[in-house]
Image (tube, rainbow, N blue to C red):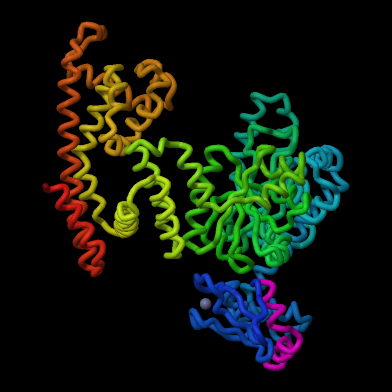
Amino acid sequence: MNTDLREIKNRLNIVDVLGEYLRLEKAGANYRALCPFHNEKSPSFMVSEEKQMWHCFGCGKGGDIFSFVMEIEGLEFREALKILAEKAGVTLASYNPQKAEQKNRTLEILELATKFYEVQLWKGAGKTKIMDYLKDRGLNDETIKIFRLGYAPNGWRNVLSFLLERGFSIGEIERTGLLVKKEAAQISNSLRRGGLISNQCQNLNDQYTEYKKSNTNYYDRFRDRIIFPICDYSGKVLGYSARVAPGGDESQAKYVNSPETEVYHKSKILYGIDKAKGEIKQKDFALLVEGNMDVIASYQAGIKNVVAVSGTALTSDQLDILKRYTKNLKMLFDMDAAGEAATRKSIKLCLEKNISAQIVILSIGKDAADAAKNDPQKLLAAVAQAKSAMEYLFQKTFSLYDKNKVEDKKKISQSLLEIVESMSDAVEKSHWVKKLAAELDVAESALTDELKKVKLTNRISANEKNQAGEVARINNRQKIDILLEELAGLMLVSENIWEDILKKNEYQSYFSRDSLLDLMLKRGREFDFNFDKFSGAIDRETRSLAEKLFFRKKFRLGLNNSLEETPADDFQKELISILDGLKEEFKKIKLKQIAKDLKLAEERKDKDAVKFLQGELRKILS
Ligand SMILES: [Zn+2]
């Protein structure tokens, strides 16, 4: 084994090996990079070509190529050895640990299956119908080959039979996520049920008989779908994303992804990273788009440093992978409500991880794939003109409110300070606080106070999640919840009060704690503040709650169905009593909260926070 080790080290250069994972910059005789093992913004990770060693001055980790691959891939020594031996072209004398062997079998099966799907696309059942569709989406042959797109034909056992014939066991194939296990009785039922509403009954029954003959409970997960292989950084297929075929059963999910397996962990995967990593290092930024098609189309349009998250929101693990190659990220998400929410969350995550985020705004097309197909030059220009994420958020937030109104100033600052708070860079933080103060025309100190509050709330809410104090909090809330329900009921009963409540700015933050009230405030005008119109347009669960509150309030106020006879005075009296109650309850809660925060701040010897909280306390008590 020692000779194997020496041989591998002789054949591989540490700069090449680490260069596959990291963006290395020459620094004198050495190379340096951002450390992949701890969070940092200036590089303290050094690689010595002369000594063939690496060391991080930030977290103290270091070693040779073996320890690096073990650390970054999360492998045992023997598995790392296997990988590097393969890379070096060295045959290991004694090597056969069962676990690594099993993982290799899984990867081998996935590689074979990918080839099977490719053949089905180029020469088999997908030759015309799927190819036509892909061409119609603007993809050319070369791109289809590079991304290894394929087609899973219709039928229950195509890939299963193919793999069984090549000597793999059901157990081995199941571990890849390519199969679904189902009880025979269930299949029989679903096929029969299908038969009742479909004229393909006979066909399905035939398929079922054939299926039963095979004497197994497994069938292909992907049937009549376009296959997008999902690879690791080195191009090994780990799983698939499968799109329903054109003209296929559109009632099924549009995309079906591989389940979590021993090799496929969706939160740690970036679609396209194997093709993009070189270009990401070179251009020193990555373009993050929403879906597989966006990646492929952008790549074909000439933006090769492009990746997508696959079936998840952007995760911290995915950013760790990107950080190996660059600390600059440009995001291009769909500009619908879901896309905007995703953008905001992703920006926050980037700031926490010290990754500089920019936003690409498309003036054409609904997504990257669309834009790449219709006008690649405009897409390139849009990516080049990406604007800083904070500037984007500033513009977006200011456009939603009127910065001359006091209440809106509060909303703008709350929304933006929440983001500023997550910045890990103090200089940047202070820059944006200054800018916000200037734009809102308020004193900077007011915002710094507000920022402390946000910080404290975040810290405490993170703390609370781990504590059993949840029950006490729910008890505290009960009275308020009852009052908020009473208020919602009153608004539902009286259109005038519903409309009036919109003007009561000083209460808005109380109201937003209740989701029904929040909805009523946001959409009341749309339904003329009318209970019938409103309840006819909302989801069933919310409607049944609204109905309950409506009828209960009517009963309490002694109303029958004709509301006209009720004197408006009664409503006003009721309203005042509810609002007074709310004010009192919120004061109590706030006092409790401050006392609790104060205790925490004192325990942590956080002098600034203590001083700030004491001030808050005085304000409430005076
Ligand atoms: Zn480090």
Residue visible at 63% across and 58% down in the picture: 270
Indicate the quadrant where residue 192 lies: top right
Residue visible at 77% across and 49% down in the picture: 301
Up/down of 324 relative to 212, above or below: below
- Which residue extends farthest bottom? 3
Where's residue 525, x and y in %? 39, 21
392, 144: nearer the viewer: 392
Up/down of 242 relative to 115, above or below: above
Up/down of 501 relative to 405, above or below: above
Where's residue 330, x and y in %? 61, 54
Where's residue 606, x and y in %? 26, 67
Where's residue 48, x and y in %? 64, 87
Magenta segment's dominant SS is helix
Indicate the quadrant where residue 497 lies: top left
611, 205: nearer the viewer: 611
The magenta segment: 1-21
Whether residue 407 is in magenta: the answer is no
7, 298: nearer the viewer: 298
